[in-house]
Amino acid sequence: MAASSKTLTSGNHNLTGDWTIVLPRRGKQRRKVSKILTPEQQQQQQSWVPTDLETDLDRELKLMRKMQICMKKLESSQFYHTFLDQIQNSQLSNCIFRVVGSELRMHMVIYGIGSIEAYEPPRLQLSLAILMKRKLNWIGDIEVFDPILSATESRVLEALGCSVLSVNEQGRRQALKPTLFFMPHCEAELYDNLLQANWRAEMLNHIVLFGNSFESYEQYVSEFKSSAIVDSAKHILAVQRFTDEFRINTVSDDYFGAFHDSSWHIFNLDPGTELQFIKSQ
């Protein structure tokens, strides 16, 4: 969803990546709340407001400039061009378009982005998501949530064309239509929540997930027999046999911190597949 005219807006954006900052009048922010269908999931939703309610135009402008610099840096990097090439010219591309199917675009949901004001890795991750939307015509609107987001960060996110959710879904969005979940370096519990909420063949087949490597979770459990990881990653481990995973190449140390051990995951289940019930903790 585009930013409201009452929020900090990034004006005309040209092909070189330059922005014109438009300072708006203050007003109430409008946010889109996505519906979770089952009663159990509705009970698990928590209304959310930013960690601070104060906004500061100087902070907003400073953060917007940081994001502009970060996007320019990323867009000109070998990492970004290698990343795009993998999406557009490999088996991964075929898998993604199998999920998109007859839909024109795939919605993007970003969970657990972290503080884009305080740290560069979250800025790089958000920059990649925004650049993907600009470059790839099959990506639609972007929704973002992290419980640590500030009011300043929320306004800048909306200025960059994202919607900030006002409900903490705890990762339990149901993929009733093709959806890209962009979740680099989230906790295992968040991936597991997402899988649990979509634990049916038709919904898993609607998901493209970018995040921590599921193969790495499986390898870690196999080597160290960690009960803590097993308990928090039951659905991750169970879905592995239905998962096509494509690891990305970070290429440069500049992007290792933001994207190391990240993979694309696409699930490929026969429509009639019955998935075993997995008891939650």
Image (cartoon, grey):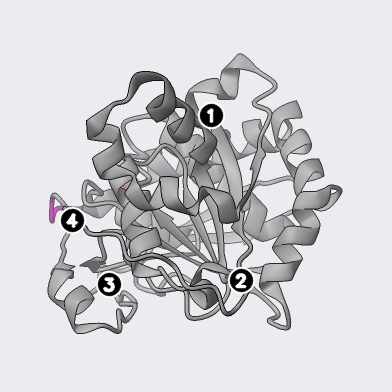
Which residue is disc 3 drawn over?
29
Q: Residues within 10 Å of mark 4 (few under 14, many from 20)?
A: some
Could you tell me the amino acid type at mark 4?
Pro
Q: Is residue 272 left or right of residue 192?
A: right
Could you tell me the amino acid type at mark 3?
Gln
Labels 1, 3: front one: 1
Q: Position of residue 59 (x, y in %)?
A: 30, 41
Residue 171, quarter of the rendered image: bottom left
Image mark for residue 50: 4
Is residue 250 positioned above or below 243 on the image? above
Q: Position of residue 137 (x, y in %)?
A: 73, 67
Q: Position of residue 255 (x, y in %)?
A: 57, 24
Give the Cα separation between the discs numbered 1 and 2. Answer: 24 Å
Task: Find the magenta span and give its range.
Answer: 52-57
**Sequence order check, earlier mark of 4 and 3:** 3
Q: Which residue occupies 67% across, 69% down?
A: 99
Kindly state the secondary structure of the residue where label 3 is placed: loop
**Sequence order check, earlier mark of 1 and 2:** 2
Kindly state the secondary structure of the residue where label 4 is placed: loop
